[in-house]
Amino acid sequence: MAETRLFLKIKDVEHGPLTVAQVKEWIEQGRFHITDFIRSEDQTVWVMAGNLAHLKRLFDAKEASSRTVAFSGWLTDMQSGKAGMALTTSGREIEERRLQEEREKLEAQRRDLEERTRELAEKTEVVGEAAISDELKAEKARLEQERTDIELARTRLEKEEQDIKAMGASVKRRARIPLIIGGILVVLALIAGSYYLFVMLPAMRARIEQLDDAIAKNEARMVTLESEISKDKAAGIDTSNKEKQLEELKKQTEELKAQKEKGGGSSEVTNPTEPPRPTVSGKVSLGGVTSITGAGASDSSRSQGTLNGTIAGIKSSVARDYSDELGTNRAAQGSVTINFTIGASGQVKSASIASAFNGRVGSAVKRAILGLSFPPASGDVQASYTIRFSP
């Protein structure tokens, strides 16, 4: 079987196809990092390098001999097919969580589309199919295009789910290897009476794998925290608590790596992961449009139903920020009103906070609104939208 080719994504720029050896060169040259993304030629999903077992070992290896062993194993697996694209345990959890969030967002879009389709059908029934206006015809065409886009997104998501499942299955297949080794060690122990081979070596292997998973979880959380700190600083939000968490995670990770270098260290199990999330979760309710003006205000693509359906996609992200705030301020609740301008193309051109019960949550809503994309319209509109937050 021919060696599987690979594609890299570095700062949203794609590179490839590349061989496994070429990817190793990029790593050694510092061009490809543990937080960049990779996929094989027969996959749709992009996965962070640190979430793949072989790649993580290659990045973590400090000795030349260790890197050689890690690379040799990866090259052998990639030459035999997709086995080399195996997710770590923490990497599989991260990818499955991301897919779940995308499924929820897609379902919210689908429900909004069905509601608007029903409203259009009612309007058409009133005037009759033959007498519907050009505006209703245009709205019908837009709904059909949205339906097509949602189906394409669903198909892409299903392919990504298949890819993640396959990479997860590779992990399970790899998990059988220590069992096989254990069986061989039992035979050797019976023959040679070697307590080390029979008991200690499997325990050390299990400990190293546990350390790998703990390190991967910490590094993934550090990447997330660094991104959140950067965004909060840009929005003028106090980041001292997150910076303290980041320093603690770095310290924990260095201790875990030191244990791994010593062959697993103490037999006592420690598994520090990301700092605990607040026990109180936040509820987000869409209050709706309080005003909408401008050249495109009368377009059906700027109706309250359309705006609600699109803005519903930010609920999960702003809920996380609100839940984080509840971790330090249990009494935090209220509403945020955002004024924003939607261009004729559908992109949000600007946004400002009209009122907010909490600066951190208000900034999170503003960032999320700026990242939205609405259907095209005949002109710009200025809208005001309110979202309510409660524990």
Image (tube, rainbow, N blue to C red):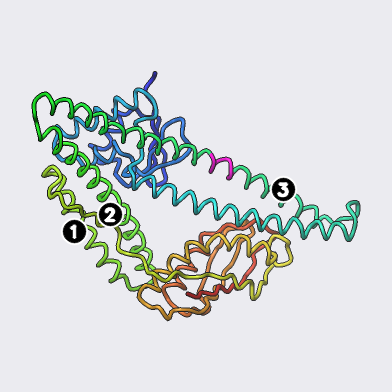
Q: Count neighbours of disc 2 (C-alpha within 10 A) and say few if under 14, some if 14 to 19, many if 20 or more.
A: many
The residue indicated by pointer 1 is 251
Relative height, residue 145 to residue 362 (above, below): above
Q: Earlier in the sequence, mark 1 or mark 3?
A: 3
Task: Reply yes or no: does residue 33 show up in magenta.
Answer: no
Q: Quadrant of the N terminus?
A: top left
Relative height, residue 151 to residue 380 (above, below): above
45 sits to left or right of 244 = right
Q: Decide if residue 10 is in sight here.
A: no
Q: Count neighbours of disc 1 (C-alpha within 10 A) and say few if under 14, some if 14 to 19, many if 20 or more.
A: few
The residue indicated by pointer 2 is 218
Which of the 4 quarters of the picture holds residue 73? top left
- Residue at 52% from the left image edge and 76% from the top image edge: 336
Label 2, label 1: how far apart the Cα atoms are: 10 Å
User: What amino acid is labelled 3 in the image?
Assistant: Glu
Residue 24: percent from left, percent from top: 27, 33
User: What amino acid is labelled 1 in the image?
Assistant: Lys
The residue indicated by pointer 3 is 144
From the viewer's side, name the closer residue of 267 and 372. Answer: 267
What span is in magenta?
153-158
Label 1, label 3: how far apart the Cα atoms are: 53 Å
Residue 259: percent from left, percent from top: 14, 48
- Residue at 34% from the left image edge and 23% from the top image edge: 79
Q: Count neighbours of disc 3 (C-alpha within 10 A) and say few if under 14, some if 14 to 19, many if 20 or more.
A: some
